[in-house]
Image (cartoon, grey):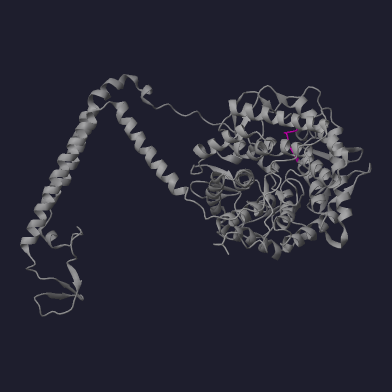
Amino acid sequence: MTTPALLPLSGRRLPPLNLGASAFPHHRATLRLSEKFILLLILSAFITLCFGAFFFLPDSSKHKRFDLGLEDVLIPHVDTSKGGKNLGGFLIHGQGHDEHRHREEEERLRNKIRADHEKALEEAKEKLKKSRDEIQAEIQTEKNKVVQELKKKDSKPLPPVPLPNLIGINSGEPTDPDIREKRNKVKEMMKHAWDNYRQYGWGHNELKPIARKGHSTNIFGNSQMGATIVDALDTLYIMGLHDEFREGQEWIDKNLDFSVNSEVSVFEVNIRFIGGLLAAYYLSGQEVFKIKAVQLAGKLLPAFNTPTGIPWAMVNLKSGVGRNWGWASAGSSILAEFGTLHMEFVHLSYLTGDPVYYNKVMHIRKLLQKMDRPNGLYPNYLNPRTGRWGQHHTSVGGLGDSFYEYLLKAWLMSDKMDTEARKMYDDAIEAIEKHLIRKSNGGLTFIGEWKNGHLERKMGHLTCFAGGMFALGADGSRDDKAGHYLQLGAEIAHTCHESYDRTTLKLGPEAFKFDGGVEAVAVRQNEKYYILRPEVIETYWYMWRFTHDPKYRQWGWEATQAIDKYCRVSGGFSGVKDVYSSSPTYDDVQQSFFLAETLKYLYLLFSNDDLLPLDNWVFNTEAHPLPVLHLANTTLSGNPAYR
């Protein structure tokens, strides 16, 4: 779930200056005539200088040690009575050992330098006989060799590890023809989104479907990392779009490079890239995905180099320098960002046998457990330098959401053995229910936001994921309250459906109020947009899995039709700026999470429960499925080297 903090920022970039040969056309002929002579002159002068320098060395240099593969002249002192002088515990072995030997060595070195000089001149002459294009081709070949060697070094094989029991990755075909038709419609929408990205935005992070070109945001830095490819892989796989999956795999194998001078969001890169690569690995078994995930994780680790171990929000993949968002409560880190690493990092330790990833996220957990929480609530901001809370703002939507989700899912992913995570989840949910969850005058249950000591009666689209979370966490809840939390999930799902149903387009706004006579409706213009978000559909799917109430499939189909009618354009799918307008304008962005989450949850909603069963799979916050690790506890790995 992408927090509001990480919405695309507009930016202006200056076009690069053209300083190539074409910028100086009147010099090209002169360069061709003179450059060979100049190069030869410089090369000859340099070699002659090196050659001549040897003959003008002072005589004392003859008595210095040359490491030329000969026996050492310095040997430990044993006995000073045999013609040697004792200097500092070492013997300079026989001064008469001798001038003749030095003369031979000098002559040999002169001959070697002379031969090297002649050889270098001959090679230079041969090079200068070649055309400019031939020389450039040779240089490029050598550069490619270096790059390949570096890739081989980075791609060293990881230790073998037993895969968890993977169930339900190629099934789910519904028997009901009506449901099958709806599922096929979702698959067709996925193919439309992918094919247009493939044609117009390939290799870019996202697509501008109306302008028909690539798109990126500040969360991915200034690099083309193919975010849509990585994010969409597992959706393609479970839909049986294997040709498209192989296209994505080939691009990742050949082009996905993390050694770029680019500042990225640690949170977004973790949930989209590491989560997406790990899910693709588990589903397909292709090693390249695991190797790339581990390479990227290594690039994120410097973000944890803070006084507290709470990671920076941003890190430069090349330099390792980290920083926080300038607007985030005096340079604080954000709860939903540093609290949404656990699932992926535990799997990284499991697959590599290296506990560093596990230790990083457990350190965060231990620090949070020691801190006081106002009213039992976790504020959204924590300063990584001081270890103190920032502004006392608590939200189950943007800035807070997936922290709570990952507490529950850490417990589920550990085969329900990580009871510490479950306790933290239960404590947090009790405080949320006490202080943030209310019922409107019209009977709609909503989750507000705690700001500066009072409750703001507003709910974000992002918060709508919580209905599914409550249902997912119902089994195993305290005091036999499973029924209560399943009902709470149903009430949140109903409220979020109302936020869709009360718009003109039948698509939900970014945020909606519960003030006075206004309920589940956006008031501000800048909260009326829909950017292809998945959270409401995510809750429909979880509620369907746990209740099989047909209304959730009906609500999901309403959303499918609205997206296809109002967000579909010839070049893909676009968000809309006003869901209350009958003729909305587009934002011209096909978000990567639309392919990773929205379409995946719709496809699963119209599939049988044996496709990615929840007893065996846990979905990260970007809807990437990771298998349950059936271990004694989360510190142990299936990798023997880790044990």
Depth check, front residue: 390 or 487: 487
Task: Give how far across and how far down residue 353 sits, in percent.
Answer: 56, 59
Outermost front residue: 175
Residue 614, above or below 534: below
Quadrant position of residue 515 = top right
Depth check, front residue: 543 or 225: 543
The residue at 74%/59% (across/down) is 416
Task: Give how far across and how far down residue 335 sits, in percent.
Answer: 69, 52
Depth check, front residue: 593 or 50: 593
Q: Is residue 620 left or right of residue 501?
A: left
Magenta-span inclusion, residue 604: no
Q: Is residue 613 left or right of residue 113?
A: right
Residue 523, above or below 53: above
- Magenta range is 530-534
Task: Give how far across and how far down residue 266 sits, in percent.
Answer: 60, 48
Disc count in the image? 0
Depth check, front residue: 228 or 182: 182
Q: Is residue 222 visible?
A: no
Q: Is residue 614 visible?
A: yes
Task: Give how far across and how far down residue 322 sits, in percent.
Answer: 55, 50
> Which quadrant is the N terminus positioned in?
top right
The residue at 15%/80% (across/down) is 79
Quadrant position of residue 151 = top left
